[in-house]
């Protein structure tokens, strides 16, 4: 009987929601703000909270609805649902999605900070280091907040640790973005001027999130299990001459890991540029960064770093990136880049297919 009753409720609700297309939510009139909800409670007769909740969840996610109205619905939904997982995911979606209006995103951030103590604590540590929230950093902040093994480094501590790691490594510095395709002869513009990928040269533009990304990626690339995986990727990617390999970097199990996403068939065949499929683009809103391999040949130094197209994509999708390029049969170089166009050499790392 309980199952049938819920089915009837959902059918009735579907009828209500159908009238709400195009952000017309007043047929029948339901509370769509905290003030209206409180007035309804004061008047006596009222709609079930579940009906109000579901309607306002739809309303706060509706791009056709006005921004102030969506903010009101967000606050009402949060009042009715509290810390319910479905609502937490809705708020998270609003924070992640680049098309979310600014006041709605700010309201979502305020609710997240008010209700999730670990996130608020980690966010406060970021803010104390001059950080301003960007939706692309939500994954990083959430994962760091959930990882109690991580010390909340200050900016000065991160800079010191990164510098020490960079100083201990060789580097393949670049003077310009990488060419889009393979080259046999040196390109004058790649060597004619000074390097553009020196860490200290970008410190004024690198945010606290950038520093954490760089620190985590250095840590990941130095792991023996990752180096063994990269050795296999070098072999397999080089054997695949019809597509370039790439994917996304996620924070899980207390470290950053690379997950490959295949190039969609409709993007055509290219061994030099990875095209991110729609699934990867969507997943990338909840990731640390994108990555691409320049593994076409062993001695591939002239292809080190991101291309101009990579930098344009980073700006367009508000995403960080990591390029790994083979420089000989047993080593690769790494370059990190930002949506603002900064490029940082992370140094040279060896890879080898050896048993642990």
Image: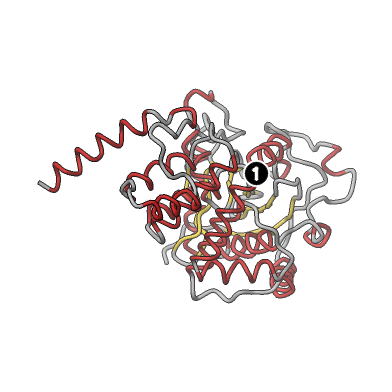
Residue at point 67% right, 37% down? 316
Count of labels in the image? 1
Residue 221 x/y as whole percent: 57, 60
Per the image, the residue denoted by label 1 is 318
State the residue in front, 93 or 84: 84
Does any portion of residue 11 appear in the rendered image? yes
Residue 3 x/y as whole percent: 14, 45
Query: Is residue 313 toward the left or the right of residue 11 in the image?
Result: right
Q: Tell which residue pokes out farthest to the left in this image.
A: 1
Residue at point 39% right, 54% down? 41
Graded by Cα atoms within 10 Å as few (under 14), some (14 to 19) or many (20 or more), the crowding at tag 1 reads some
Instruction: Find residue 275 and report its image quarter.
Output: top right
Query: Is residue 11 toward the left or the right of residue 118 in the image?
Result: left
Residue at point 43% right, 40% down? 58
Residue 229 x/y as whole percent: 47, 54
Does any portion of residue 92 appear in the rendered image? no
Residue at point 19% right, 39% down? 7
Residue 183 x/y as whole percent: 72, 33
């Amino acid at each position: 009987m309980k199952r049938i009753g819920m089915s009837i409720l959902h059918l009735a609700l579907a009828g209500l929601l159908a009238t709400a297309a195009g952000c017309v939510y007043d047929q029948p009139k339901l509370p769509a703000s905290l003030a209206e909800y409180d007035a309804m409670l004061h008047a006596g007769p009222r709609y079930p909270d579940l009906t109000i909740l579901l309607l306002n969840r739809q309303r706060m996610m509706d791009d056709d609805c006005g921004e102030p109205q969506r903010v009101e619905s967000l606050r009402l939904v949060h009042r009715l649902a509290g810390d319910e997982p479905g609502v937490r995911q809705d708020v998270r979606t609003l924070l992640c999605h680049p098309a979310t209006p600014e006041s709605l995103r700010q309201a979502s951030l305020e609710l997240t900070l008010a209700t999730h103590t670990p996130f608020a604590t980690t966010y406060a540590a970021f803010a104390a280091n001059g950080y301003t929230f960007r939706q692309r950093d939500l994954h990083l902040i959430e994962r760091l907040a959930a990882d109690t093994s991580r010390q909340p480094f200050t900016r000065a501590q991160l800079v010191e640790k990164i510098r020490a790691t960079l100083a201990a490594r060789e580097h393949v510095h670049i003077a310009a973005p990488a060419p889009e395709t393979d080259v046999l002869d040196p390109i004058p513009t790649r060597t004619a001027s000074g390097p553009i990928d020196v860490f200290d040269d970008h410190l004024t533009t690198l945010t606290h999130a950038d520093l954490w990304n760089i620190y985590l990626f250095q840590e990941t690339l130095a792991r023996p299990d990752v180096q063994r995986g990269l050795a296999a990727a070098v072999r397999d990617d080089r054997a695949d001459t019809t597509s370039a390999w790439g994917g996304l970097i996620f924070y899980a199990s207390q470290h950053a890991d690379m997950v490959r996403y295949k190039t969609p068939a409709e993007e055509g065949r290219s061994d030099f540029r990875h095209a991110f499929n729609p699934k990867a683009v969507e997943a990338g809103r909840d990731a640390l960064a994108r990555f691409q391999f320049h593994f076409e040949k062993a001695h591939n130094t002239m292809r080190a770093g991101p291309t101009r197209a990579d930098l344009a994509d980073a700006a367009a999708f508000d995403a960080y990136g990591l390029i790994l390029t083979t420089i000989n049969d047993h080593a690769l170089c790494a370059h990190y880049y930002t949506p603002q166009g900064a490029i940082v050499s992370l140094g040279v790392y060896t890879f080898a297919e050896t048993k642990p």
